[in-house]
Image (tube, rainbow, N blue to C red):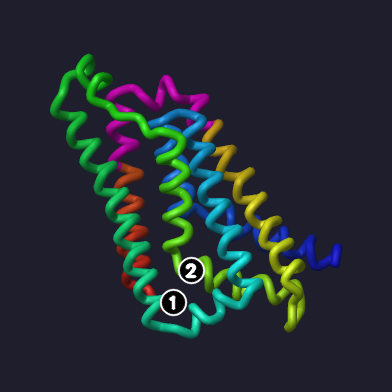
Amino acid sequence: MIGNLGAFVGVSLVVIVTPGPDTALTIRSALVGGRLSGLATAAGVATGQATWAVCAAAGLAALLRASQPALFAIRIVGAAYLIYLGMGALLAAIRSRQVDAAKAIAHRRGISPATAYRQGLLSNLSNPKMAVFFIALLPQFTGPQPAFVGVVGFGLVFCSLTLAWLSGYAFAVAKAGDVLRRARVRRLLDGLTGGVLVALGLRLASEQI
């Protein structure tokens, strides 16, 4: 079991550190709402992953994987949500060009930790790749007929690693907040994260899961 856990952690770290929607959302939340909002997004993502782990352990994720219409629907909803968030960031970048530096601060709307948490949770839950990931990965380390507790346990390890990694992003962005919130830098980051989220949404919509 210890050997399997070590191998699982190694594989998980490779997956977790690869940038994706969760990373982009966490960075944007920390940029717009500060450290607490960034941490809230990270917590929402980890909660979504924990939900997928429980579903995989209960066999629900496998049933979803077998239902192509349901998987397709979740994929489209997830893609639409990422595009929606990305377009919001792009519009914020465009709007910031239409006001002067003094008015820009007044026009910026932060993001509350509750909203940030919800965005992280919904983004993760609407990503069908997570269902496929937990179905494909966890059994490799828990055996062909894994026990419920074993699957959930490994899943929680993955969630904890994700939470730690994304929290690091939140702290780093918040620490550099004064620089990153300068009007020109903020506009650039809004455009960048918005473009990344839209691109990830389009890629998810076009991929075959």
Secondary structure under the numbered disc 1 in the rendered image:
loop
Q: Residue furthest top?
A: 102
**Tag shown at residue 129:** 2
Range shown magenta: 172-191
Q: Residue at x 34, y 55 (%)?
A: 82
* Residue 153 spot, x, y in % from top left: 73, 61
* Rendered view: 198 above or below 98: below
The reply to whether the magenta stretch includes residue 184 is: yes
Question: Is residue 160 found left or right of 177 in the rendered image?
Answer: right
- Mark 1, residue position: 209
* Residue 147 spot, x, y in % from top left: 76, 74
Q: Nearer the viewer, residue 64 or 25?
A: 64
Q: Quadrant of the C terminus?
A: bottom left
Q: Residue at x 35, y 65 (%)?
A: 203
Q: Residue at x 35, y 44 (%)?
A: 193
Amino acid type at mark 1: Ile
**Label 2 neighbour load within 10 Å: few <14, some 14-19, many 20+:** some
Res. 67 image quadrant: bottom left
Q: Nearer the viewer, residue 188 or 198?
A: 198
Amino acid type at mark 2: Lys
Q: CA distance from mark 2 to mark 1?
A: 7 Å
**Tag shown at residue 1:** none
Total numbered labels placed on residues in the image: 2
Question: Is residue 80 found left or right of 103 in the rendered image?
Answer: right
Secondary structure under the numbered disc 2 in the rendered image:
helix
Q: Nearer the viewer, residue 105 or 118?
A: 118
The reply to whether the magenta stretch includes residue 57 is: no
Q: Residue furthest right?
A: 2
Q: Tags 2 and 1 in contact by the CB under 8 Å rule?
A: yes
* Residue 89 spot, x, y in % from top left: 28, 42
